Amino acid sequence: MSQGTGDRPEPVTAPIAVGWRTRIDPSRRVRRVRDSGLAIIQIVVASTAAYAFASSVLGHPAPLLAATVTVSSLGLVRDARPRRVLETVLGMLLGILVSELLLIVAGTGWWQLALALGLTLAVARFLSPQASFAIAAAIQSLIVMVIPMTGGAPFVRLTDGIVGGVFALLVTALIPRSPRRVELRDARALFRDVGSAAAALGQALRRSDRMRAERGLEKARALQSRVDEWRDSLDSGLAIARISPFLRRQRGELDRHARVLAAMDLATRNLRVIARRVVYLCDDGTPRPVAADVLAELARGIDLVGRSLDDISLEPVARETIRAIAAHLDPRELMPGASLGDQNLLAAMRPLAVDLLVGTGMTQADARAAVPRI
């Protein structure tokens, strides 16, 4: 096996920038504003349009809630899927409705405010397990109870809230946040960290370095958060693409990425199994260059799978590369006469190869058939 990208030296520790320069460095702040640019445009357009519609078309004197509902429901969070926006809107409408009813029945005052908040939170928690749903309802309930209505019939503010919710959903579909940019960024972060973990484990095997093996295990265990972040952004992108007429062409690519994500979720779990075995084997002080080479080749395949997200033409290259590695994953062939621990380590790499092959588009049955029987 030739040495792949996973065989580059991996430092046990990495330098962390500290000092006053890092605290005043504007680059991260600029990136934060840039990444939120489309969300800011959504909020400005939706809030302004909702306010203008409620004021000019419906004739409401001060449609505050038409604007606040759009701001609160769209927000600057990563998860911009329409279902989340709708759930937030419904929570806020619930708070407005409860307070409007209580104003009609009991009027205003401190105990009415307490009663409105208590009822709103209780009903919201009954209807939804999401804490954000209840908080959104409580905030709108508080606004209705504290800020007096400047005229108009009952439930005018409920109408304003509905207008704000409608415009928030319209903007989600007509000015969609770029789903591919965010989910690709999360995907690259996952593949980068997988490569880093595999490199650390490869170096540990080559040097029989227990400290480096434990570092690789630590990195492998941290991969689940990367998987979850990619899943959230990908699910959000798929949900937006389903309702936005401008993103229909991206659905096929996002579905392909979902297949890769499912495979990488399993692959990272198998990498953790491999990492635990590497830590155990490094206790005896014996270098294992063959196992290190195999892991380095698999890391090269993982890198190709990650690059294929941007360039689909690399997907068959990744498939054939991993298939060639999988065809030789027979512990008796690679390490004849090796100990049971060494054979178990190589055997643990077989499911990882199968997961990667599925990620390149192979069926589960074909991927399993690519690995020799043992």
Image: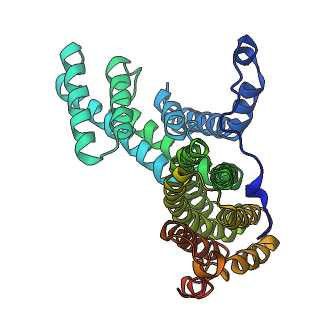
In front of the other: 30 or 316: 316
On the image, which quarter does residue 298 sit in?
A: bottom right
**Residue 107 in view of the camera:** no
Where 339 sits versus 203, above or below? Answer: below
| Vertical relation: 28 (above or below) 295 | above
- Residue drawn at point x = 35 percent, y = 25 percent: 144
Q: What is the basis of the colouring in this image?
A: rainbow
Residue at 55% x, 60% y is 271
At horizontal 54% and vertical 34% (from top left) the residue drawn is 71
Residue pictured at 53% horizontal, 37% vertical? 70
> x, y percentage for residue 320?
75, 79
Q: Which quadrant would the N terminus be assigned to in this image?
A: bottom right
x, y percentage for residue 47? 59, 35
Nearest the viewer among 90 and 167 is: 90
- Examine the image and state in which quarter residue 135 appears: top left
Q: Is residue 99 visible?
A: yes
In front: 358, or 51? 358
